[in-house]
Image (cartoon, rainbow, N blue to C red):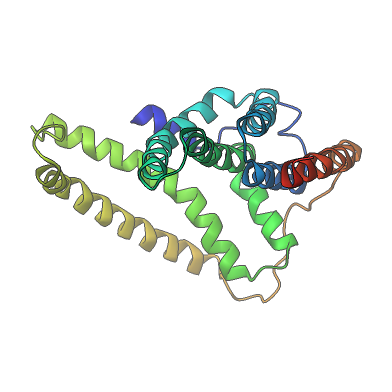
Amino acid sequence: MQWIAQGFIFRRVTSPFHQLDPRVKLLVSVELFTLSLLVGSLPEVIIALSGIFAIASISNILRRMSRTLSYTLFFAIIIFVINILVGYPLMDAFVIAVRFVAIVGSTSVFFLTTPPDELELVMKWFRLPRDIVFAFVTAVRFVPVLMMDALQIMDAQKSRGLELQKGNIFSRFKRFIPILIPLIVDAVLRSGDLAEAMESRAYGAVKKPTSLHELEMGLLGKVVSISSIALIVPVSYLFLFGI
């Protein structure tokens, strides 16, 4: 479980893709996401996944992305089974399930290569309300932290004799109560510390606060943006109209 949780935490890596402007990385991720939505056959799924894994390989995040995608395999299997039960052909059900994996992979490309600070700059560049930006970036920062806290609480409770793997599904849910209560208490304490930090820094006192860093798209970012658009438009057209 801890191996999977590590895949949701940002790690700074030296790669050409990491050095791009976050707006360029967002553009590439949106293009891969769009491509994943348009796939309708097995060859198209293979093309979409190949593009995602190629970007992940260039970014040196292939191993960490595999952790994230391994978490989605359970849901992909559920999607496959449901589509089989409702009458979809075997190949169509498989394509739909793998499409879900590709969609998660396309979003992982952005979040595994972009730190929360750059994510905040991108959202501010879109002129989103400051409170929404702060709430979203805070969630991105704290969700992985809460996952690690949950794993630590699970290990602590297991060392005290709590067995999570035995019994039926209802008894297992009951055994998670000693994990959820400390986790909720810890989250409340963290939110209190965050509120005090915001107050001490006079959050909201200035209507239009300035930023220490500004977004600058270099020549490489412009080339990647133009090239990706020039590539994704005809491929999306082929996927959409099957020509």
Residue at x 64% of width, y 71% of height: 129
Q: Above or below — where is 172 with respect to 181?
A: above
Measuring from the top left, give residue 110's x and y in whole percent: 64, 42
Closer to the camera, 108 or 180?
A: 108
Q: Is residue 25 left or right of residue 79?
A: right
Measuring from the top left, give residue 16's x and y in whole percent: 76, 28
Quarter of the picture containing the C terminus is top right
Closer to the camera, 33 or 190?
A: 33
Measuring from the top left, give residue 102's x and y in whole percent: 57, 37
User: In the rendered image, which quarter is residue 61 located in?
Assistant: top right
Closer to the camera, 78 or 167?
A: 78
Q: Is residue 209 left or right of residue 205?
A: right
Q: Above or below — where is 114 with respect to 42?
A: below
Residue at x 91% of width, y 39% of height: 219
Measuring from the top left, give residue 174's x and y in whole percent: 11, 48
Numbered label tally: 0
Q: Is residue 59 left or right of residue 230?
A: left
Residue at x 46% of width, y 34% of height: 90
User: In the rendered image, which quarter is residue 88 located in?
Assistant: top left
Q: Above or below — where is 46 with respect to 152?
A: above
Residue at x 51% of width, y 50% of height: 140
Quarter of the picture containing the N terminus is top left
Closer to the camera, 241 or 235?
A: 241
